[in-house]
Amino acid sequence: MYLLVQSALAQDVGTGLKPSRLDSIQYLSEVVISSKQPFRSTATSQTLKGGELQALSTTSVADALKYFAGVQIKDYGGLGGLKTINVRSLGAQHVGIYVDGIRVTNAQNGTVDLGKFSLSTMESVSLYNANKLDNCQSASEYASGATVYLRTRRPVKDSLSVQLRRASFTTWMAKANAQFERKGWSGFIDGEWTDSRGDYPFRYHSEYEDTVGRRSNSDIRYGRIEGALFKGGFSSHVYYYDSERGCPGGIVRRLSDKYVNVGREWDRDFFVQASYQAQLMDYHHVKVNAKYTHEYLRYCTDYPENHNTARVNNHYIQQDGYGALCYAFTPWSWLSLSASYDARYSKLTADLKKFDDVFRLDQKQVLAAQVNWQGLRMAASLLHQHYRDITSAHVGAADPLDRWTPAFSTAYTWGGLTLRAWYKKIFRAPTLNDLYYTQAGNRNLKPEYTKQLNFGLEYQFNSPHWNASLQADVYQNKIENRIVCLPLKGTYTWSMMNYGYTFCRGLNATAQGRFHTGGWQFSLLTSLTWQRDVNRTDPDDEDTYDKPICYSPTLSSGITAIVGWRNLQLTTSYLYVGERMWSYADPEDVLAPYHNIDTKLTYSHTIGKMEWGVCLEVCDLLDEQYEHIPRYPMPGRNYKLTLSFGL
């Protein structure tokens, strides 16, 4: 049941210094040069790259994404907690995560744990709220409400670096990275090992209780190794992740020695992928993608000291094979026509009682067109998705799902100013957990539809010593047939069902400025989100109709300031998230607003051929033990000290 609850919760919604080859400080002083482009993207996009990306907290991709406008990162407590992304209150399953252009998938519950991906190998992290619209894209890239692109770094020279970290709550980390470049081929191997007890102190205070304790069963041990190989239009990536972690559960009102949440989880994730793209003559572009994924998950609560929950010892194996063929034709410089076909075959096996193996064939096709003409850019796409599940003969499968969905976007650029508008209709198919999880799955679920409408503007200014950009978007989202998990058959028996219609209006705004002079570099990055996301399901239900959606804050904002002088750099990040309702049972059931300040000081130095650096991070400087999920307190103030060495 842990996996189902976990899935249901996730548905709620220029600098001028010499670059270093050390992972923790690489490209800290990179100059980000922007030239005037004749056509800017019709999509709403945000990107962190180079020095600004590495200047943020170096733990995981989730630490970078939380500063984007319109983003909520849901963290289930500590280093070992599940970390998912929610964009504009669409839900985690509506966000596609892509590594080098190929999607990271999970047919079982539809969510991706961002804590499994390190920033140390990333060149850039980007968020798109509409289609990215490259000339040659896979059909899968059109099939999400929002997309996150993780682009790994392409090495330009040979290097070897090592990192050692000591952090709060008995946390140790060791990391090594080797990069090479030979005759047009380049690549890297990156490995990491982390061990954390995770036993941070907490205080939970409410009107009825005041509990002080120390988080237990929140330890994690994991190893990650990945490698990549590039040449021209060819790229490949191999990834393996192996972890064991405790699942600490929520803080209960009566904390005693007898109560210990003993749930533990083991993960072994592996994928290998490759992509090749080429331009044939001047008019034809072709791209081929391929990927194989194998994921093993074990969840166990079957221990003698377990007196409070059901005893389970479940094992899940998910395999996934994927292939895509993309073609684009550009008969004139102002017109691009493209077509893509994707096929994905997924298999889920588990040793749950009365659970039968499930096979899913997912096929997608898209037809798209783009027009660029004297500052005007327009794009349109028509996406077809077909899902078919196969189970054993005595357990019926869900009906096949076959749908067409359109998207339209336009933008006009005049000088440094761009005006844009876009509309996108998309859906997410029910996951295998939604349909087939023992006792809770519902084979009659309908797809969850989203309709997004957006109007925005963007302004950019560039000069030899400084550049600035500003963008603002107003948007409207409608979600129909939300898939939720409700206790329809008693307190302990939950069921998946389509329930709800939600309506959201919002504003996202970002402003960025960069200035450099002499040995000094300054960057300021800001984001603001205001949105009103309400329940419009049942006008007769006065307790829920037109009330805010759970976990959706009205206001959130972020500011990141980066100051660099020669080999020294200071980064300070401030994040504010307003109050969020988490239950309709009581209007007072709200999560308090919180302020989070992180700061990071980095120094690097070169002695001969040896480059070394030291980095001190202080996270949650104000020691606010805020919550993303009720009764899952986050760690308070904590420290990280990292030493780096490289050749």
Image (spheres, rainbow, N blue to C red):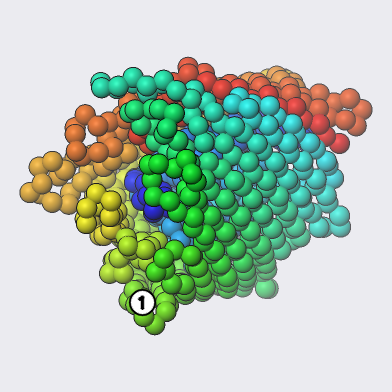
Q: Give coordinates of residue 46: x percent, y percent.
A: 50, 42
Q: Is 158 on the left or on the right of 405, as rendered?
A: right
Q: Is residue 91 visible?
A: no
Does residue 111 sit above or below 635 in this rendering? below
**Residue type, numbered disc 1:** Val
Does residue 524 sit above or below 497 in this rendering? above
Residue lying at 38% horizontally and 45% vertically, measured from the top left: 309
Residue 613 vs residue 17, the one in the foreground = 613
Residue lying at 10% horizontally and 42% vertically, measured from the top left: 542
Residue lying at 26% horizontally and 42% vertically, measured from the top left: 549
Q: Quadrant of the C terminus?
A: top right
Residue at the far front in the pictured view:
304
Q: Is 631 on the left or on the right of 163, as rendered?
A: left
Q: Give coordinates of residue 361: x percent, y percent.
A: 47, 75
Q: Give coordinates of residue 276: x percent, y percent.
A: 67, 67
Does residue 117 sit above or below 297 in this rendering? above
Does residue 274 sit above or below 120 in this rendering? below
Tag 1 residue: 395
